[in-house]
Image (tube, grey):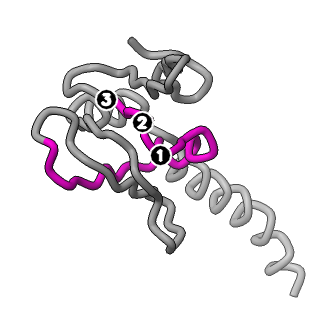
Amino acid sequence: MEFLKTLKKPFLIVWLFIFTSCLKVDCEENSKAFREYECLQIFERLPILESPYMESEGKHLLTGEDCVCKYRWLNNYKQLLEKGDTIIKRKGELTFSIHKRDTIIVVKWECEGKIYE
């Protein structure tokens, strides 16, 4: 029994190390993925169902066709969106903007407390 007690502490330390290292965010890889994403949308509505990846429904800014923008970052700004706002996230960029009737909100991409450009 004493033997098991002595094994517990090192096992716990190793387990915590493995667990926390798996949770480490790779900001460089995430920024590359975010650069590849594009959303040019005149916002109309949010879907009824909640999800970690917020989907905004609307019309494509250039074609006028129905489109859905789906990305996790958008979920942080859903409370700012109103029908008629324009969401602009261009491929190759790390910023996006929400254009309102009288205001433009520009959001820079941030990861682990660092702003990427």
Pointers 2 and 3 in contact (CB under 8 A)? no
Q: Residue 98 at what x, y percent from top left?
A: 46, 28
Q: Is residue 66 magenta?
A: yes
Report the amino acid beneath label 1: Lys
Measure the C-alpha gap from mark 2 to mark 1. 34 Å
10 Å neighbourhood of mark 3: few (<14), some, or many (≥20)?
many
Name the residue at 35% across, 56% down. 57
Q: Nearer the viewer, residue 42 or 7?
A: 42
Report the amino acid beneath label 2: Asp
Q: Residue 30 at what x, y percent from top left?
A: 36, 36
Of the numbered discs 2 and 3, the one sitting upstream in the chain is 2
Name the residue at 50% across, 72% down. 48
Quarter of the view holding residue 91: top left
Report the amino acid beneath label 3: Lys
Residue named by callout 2: 26
Magenta residues? 64-88
